[in-house]
Image: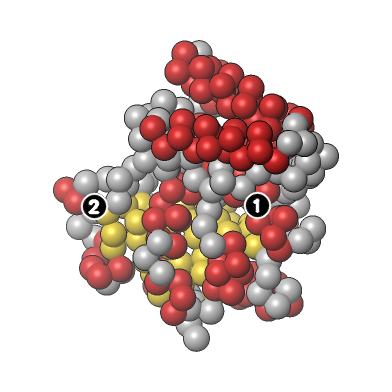
Amino acid sequence: MKNCICIVLWHNNQSLFEELINNSNLDIFVISHKSIDDIPHWLNTYVNSEHIFIEPNIGYDWGAYQQFLEKKIYLNYSSIFFSHDDLLIKDNLIFNYCLDIIEANNGYCIVGNGLNNKKRDWPLTHIHCYAHSKWKPPSWNFCHDTMRGSFFGTSSNALKIIDNFEVYWDHHKFLGVGAGNWSLRATCGKIQEILGENSFQFLSQNYRDTPFLIEMERGKLNNSLNDKHQPVNIRYLLIYRISKFLMTWYMDTNNKNIKNYLSIIMSFIFNKL
């Protein structure tokens, strides 16, 4: 079976598509979160028009990947890569290196470019990030790695087991791009519980800039925009506090009925937001 890549089109980085056409054997699929009028004219030079999908921008990058999964196209491929379009490939063999690691793990791993963060106690410090998710951390002590959504690859078999990514669907733009971090942490926690302790593999210990590729940040090599220094968003703060309160209650109780009740409440809240 062949391999493919799903690219989120946002920054319209033509050089990435040029590299993929010239130096990889991947079938290319594109999820665009912009209107059809904003799709660059050159895209059809690299991508079959039937492989280009326009979807609502309500889940950001992880939402785009989930939108791709829901089309079930990945079932026709052995391994699947997911990426932003603001990558600079430095080593054309990067996909071969990733495929070797996937094969060495019998397909049951996620391979990324560079180590995202050595921090692993996310449920303990960021329990609010799991409120929207159907998957919940099994305990406060559960630790897991995280994988940047910029670039990663895995097997079709692994995706079948994972089933879906735990996306925060930000219908009304309450969280903005920060919702991507909620999706990332919940999805990575779920993946690690399903695939095991060594489910996340990295080509390098470097962050973003490795010998294999550079993961730009919002289309720039050095982005001064930092979520931590943005003006306080009252709606974000409200959702954060509600999520933290409900998830703390969920994690602290041993009563299964209460857990089920809280899960229903959280599901209702995040289906409405």
Q: How far across and down, in percent of the image, does residue 228 sit?
A: 58, 22
Taking depth in this image into account, of 143 and 210 the one nearest to the observer is 143
Q: How far across and down, in percent of the image, does residue 18 sit?
A: 38, 66
Instruction: Tell me whether the residue at label 1 lies in contact with that at label 2, contact meaning CB atoms closer than 8 angstroms.
Output: no
Taking depth in this image into account, of 199 and 262 the one nearest to the observer is 262
Taking depth in this image into account, of 237 and 80 the one nearest to the observer is 237
Q: How far across and down, in percent of the image, does residue 48 sit?
A: 27, 71
Residue that sits furthest to the front in the current view: 257
Residue 57 in view of the camera: yes
Gap between marks 1 and 2 measured at Cα: 33 Å
Q: Residues within 10 Å of mark 2 (few under 14, many from 20)?
A: some
Taking depth in this image into account, of 7 and 192 the one nearest to the observer is 192
Quarter of the picture holding the C terminus: top left
Residue that sits furthest to the right in the current view: 141
Q: Residue at x 71, y 55 (%)?
A: 192
Q: Residue at x 66, y 34 (%)?
A: 258
Q: Residues within 10 Å of mark 1 (few under 14, many from 20)?
A: many
Dot 2 falls on a residue whose secondary structure is loop
Q: How far across and down, in percent of the image, does residue 44 sit?
A: 24, 66
Q: Is residue 141 above or below residue 89?
A: above
Indicate left or right for 247 with 33 as reference.
Answer: right
Dot 1 falls on a residue whose secondary structure is helix
Disc 1: which residue: 190
Indicate left or right for 55 with 6 as reference.
Answer: left
Q: Residue at x 37, y 40 (%)?
A: 58
Residue 25 in view of the camera: no
Residue that sits furthest to the left in the current view: 37
Q: Amino acid at mark 2?
A: Ile
Disc 2: which residue: 39
Q: Is residue 144 above or below residue 258?
A: below
Q: Give the quadrant of residue 198.
A: bottom right
Indicate left or right for 69 with 260 as reference.
Answer: left
